[in-house]
Amino acid sequence: MNEENFSTQQSLQVITEMINKTRQTLNDNSKYFLLWGWLTALAISGQFVLKVILHYENFFRVWYVLFIGIIISNYWIIKDGRKVKVKTYVGESMSNLWLGMGISFFVLSMLFVKMGWYYCYPFFIMMYGLGTFVSGKILQFTPLVIGGILAWVLSIVSAWFDFDYQMLFAVAALLISYIIPAHLLRNHQQKKSLSMEDKNFNPAESLNLIDSMIKQAKSAEKDNGMGWIIWGWLLFIASSLHYLSIKFQWEYRSYVWQAFNICAGILLLYYILRSTVLKRKSRVKTYTNQLLSKLTFAFFISLAIIVYGTAVTGLEENGINFGFLLQLYAFWMFIYAAAFRFTLFYVGAAINWIGAMAVFYFREKLGAEILLVHAICVLTGYIIPGHIAYRQFYKN
């Protein structure tokens, strides 16, 4: 910073461009929520009418309407991309989040093509909640966060109903997590003016602001990888022991995952106590670290819903639950890689998505070997990148 001589006008221009870009990002994201919220809600409503009321055999054809959304979205992306002069962390975070969501929805759809669609909506609703909850935290917009939480609740409740009525839960979830928050976001953005616009900065203040933003951005991209190492080894050991217990017919093999749950519960309790009661102070409180902490919360909520949903629907009996778990792991790795710009987690995400599809497509042939697939995916997605991140963190 000392080598650059900014005039007051130049430094204020940098700040103003970032403010305007952030405002534009908020407005742009509202239109995507509205487009996909309304299109998907109309498709599901149409499917309900065609299947339940009119008894039309090819009710699934109503989903072709989503191609309209794909065309419009791509047009908007290309059009908006040409206008971009200043990249913001909010914009990049939202792009990476919904790229990961798009891949996850595609993987889920391919899985349900193979295993049947009867219980698809509880899992889709869970993903609606995950996407909108994290989006709400990125944009710091409470209605999206609340919509995500309510979608999770609907996901749990819908698992107790037949497929026909799960569609109605999905429409309700889209309404409260996509459509209503998106309209509120657009109205909020039209009324709100950022307070920084009206503030007059002197040269020293504007340079200090830019300097602090650069320092904070540098510190935001650091993580020691310890969380990945701990959870990775726990999952790897549990999967490997479960596999061995099946092969060697151990008498107490049911205790493997019970022991894992106890360890996981102790770790979660420690994390909660550390962040609330103990309140360990961080040298720099960054946007990245705050966002990742919220995303971790969303991850564990989604994980709990998957465990609950597969147990209620009986999908865990033949190992299908591990496919859903790998799909969630992949999504989390992808977002983490984007936040910290750590390429190995992109690779881990791809391997876990492939592992999820392998579990669903070859579950009958794999049998107990599903546990080995799970262990290998955890090894390549959690443990190896975690150890490399740990070494790089302390080396630097």
Image (cartoon, rainbow, N blue to C red):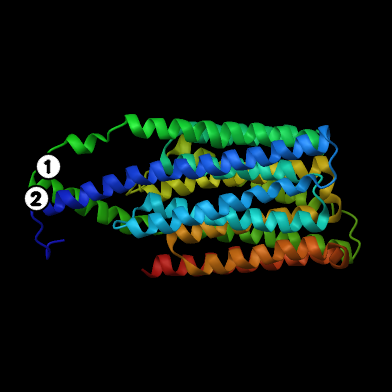
Q: Secondary structure at mark 2?
A: helix
82 relative to 147, above or below: below
- The answer to whether the residues at label 1 and label 2 have Cβ atoms under 8 Å apart is yes
- Give the labeled residue for mark 2: 8
Report the side of 197 relative to 58 (left or right).
left
Report the side of 31 relative to 131 (left or right).
left
The mark found on residue 201 in the picture is 1
Q: Secondary structure at mark 1?
A: loop
User: Earlier along the polypeptide chain: callout 1 or callout 2?
Assistant: 2
**What residue is drawn where x is 71% and y is 65%?**
355
**What residue is drawn where x is 89% and y is 66%?**
248
Quadrant of the image occupied by residue 78: bottom left
* Residues packed near mark 2 inside 10 Å, few (<14), some (14 to 19) or many (20 plus): some
Instruction: Measuring from the top left, give residue 134's x and y in whole percent.
Output: 51, 44
39 relative to 344, above or below: above
Report the side of 271 relative to 160 (left or right).
left
Please name the amino acid that badge 2 sits on: Thr
Quadrant where the N terminus is found in the figure: bottom left
45 relative to 108, above or below: above
Please name the amino acid that badge 1 sits on: Phe
221 relative to 208, above or below: below
Instruction: Measuring from the top left, give residue 241's x and y in whole percent.
Output: 78, 62
Q: Cα distance, mark 1 to mark 2?
A: 8 Å
Instruction: Measuring from the top left, give residue 392's x and y in whole percent.
Output: 43, 69
Q: Can you see residue 162?
A: no
The mark found on residue 25 in the picture is none
Quadrant of the image occupied by residue 79: bottom left
**What residue is drawn where x is 71% and y is 53%?**
324
**What residue is drawn where x is 84% and y is 67%?**
366
Q: Report the label total.
A: 2
Report the side of 11 relative to 396 (left or right).
left
Q: Can you see residue 179?
A: yes
